[in-house]
């Protein structure tokens, strides 16, 4: 079976997950989609490039190959809402963030088709994610999962006005030890690279399924999500070009955040 993800394993106790960077759509599914949806506008564009410092920090990276329109890897397999009472898209989205239909009339996947996608695409990614976290925890006595995301700075469907630049989520402090969140908050308050960016912890984005499910502080597996506003590193109109000059300070800040996690991990491992 063809793998549905890309993975680069390295030696540090951090694993970066990128569940929404995929752009591929199998032909059998693409045939049922509208032309506009095939441009996958709600992709977390260019995160592997933005996080290219992962190699220098020996951080492992797991990323999706297939678009979130095929299957949303950051939703629970039973598709229970992670934000009750708020508008969200499901495990198999039927419309885009701006409410345009993804599928041609009469082509929305039924329950059987959705379950097949869960088995074929969702399960592979999560099996690998769980496997790597177990391996990291066994090797280092600790594991940190950094779930990397980005979204357009204006999405009225989900939040009013402009989104803050860096949106950290730790499931209201449940997915990681409090001192890790505190270390990251302190860095955001003191880093020279953070001064130009707005940030919030556990605001509109508290962490999706991946953060909430895999974060197990009692087992020394700590998870957090970072949802970046895309205006910090790309041009937000199609073709969503990466802007290296715009991204420069953000990359340095991300490097500092990763280094902070590594330093914290070195002091909290359990061998």
Image (tube, grey):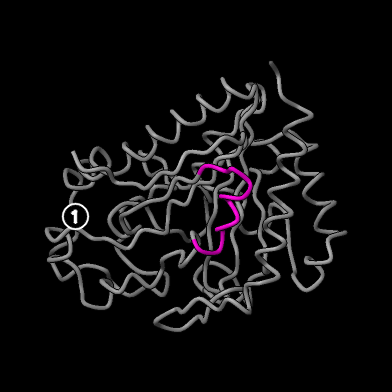
Residue 58 belongs to magenta span: yes
> Hey, which residue is sitting farthest front in the picture?
56
Residue 129: image location, x then y, percent: 44, 36
Q: Is residue 249 above or below residue 170?
A: below
Q: Is residue 41 above or below residue 262?
A: below
> Where's the C terminus, which quadrant?
top right
Residue 243, image quadrant: bottom right
Residue 69: image location, x then y, percent: 31, 60
Magenta stretch in the rendered image: 49-60
Residue 50, image quadrant: bottom right
> For this view, does 146 lie left or right of residue 77?
right
Residue 40: image location, x then y, percent: 33, 69
> For this view, does 58 lie left or right of residue 239?
right
> For this view, does 177 lie left or right of residue 160?
right
Q: Residue at x 21, y 43 (%)?
A: 2
Q: Nearer the viewer, residue 113 or 83?
A: 113
Residue 253: image location, x then y, percent: 72, 61
Q: Which residue is mark 1?
A: 109
Q: Nearer the viewer, residue 115 or 5?
A: 5
> Hey, which residue is sitting farthest top in the picture?
271
Q: Residue at x 81, y 44 (%)?
A: 182
Q: Residue at x 41, y 75 (%)?
A: 98
> Where's the N terminus, which quadrant?
top left
Residue 231 belongs to magenta span: no
Secondary structure state at the residue bearing disc 1: loop
Q: Is residue 270 above or below residue 126?
A: above
């Amino acid at each position: 079976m063809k793998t549905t993800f890309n993975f680069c394993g390295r030696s540090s106790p951090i694993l970066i997950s990128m569940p929404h960077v995929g752009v591929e759509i199998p032909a059998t599914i693409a045939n049922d989609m509208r032309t506009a949806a095939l441009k996958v506008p709600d992709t977390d564009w260019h995160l592997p490039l933005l996080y290219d410092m992962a190699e220098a920090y020996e951080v492992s990276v797991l990323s999706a190959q297939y678009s979130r329109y095929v299957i949303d890897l950051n939703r629970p397999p039973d598709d229970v809402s992670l934000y009750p009472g708020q508008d969200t898209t499901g495990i198999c989205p039927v419309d885009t963030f701006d409410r345009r239909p993804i599928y041609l009339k009469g082509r929305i996947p039924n329950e059987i088709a959705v379950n097949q996608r869960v088995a074929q695409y969702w399960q592979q990614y999560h099996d690998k994610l769980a496997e790597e976290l177990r391996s990291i925890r066994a090797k280092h006595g600790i594991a940190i999962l950094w779930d990397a995301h980005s979204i357009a700075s204006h999405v009225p469907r989900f939040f009013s006005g402009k989104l803050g630049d860096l949106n950290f989520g730790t499931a209201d402090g449940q997915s990681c030890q409090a001192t890790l969140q505190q270390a990251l908050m302190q860095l955001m308050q003191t880093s020279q690279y953070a001064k130009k960016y707005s940030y919030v912890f556990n605001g509109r984005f508290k962490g999706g399924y991946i953060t909430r499910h895999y974060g197990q502080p009692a087992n020394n597996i700590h998870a957090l999500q970072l949802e970046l506003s895309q205006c910090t590193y790309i041009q937000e109109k199609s073709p969503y070009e990466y802007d290296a000059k715009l991204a420069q300070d953000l990359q340095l800040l991300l490097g500092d955040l990763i280094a902070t996690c590594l330093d914290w991990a070195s002091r909290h491992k359990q061998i």
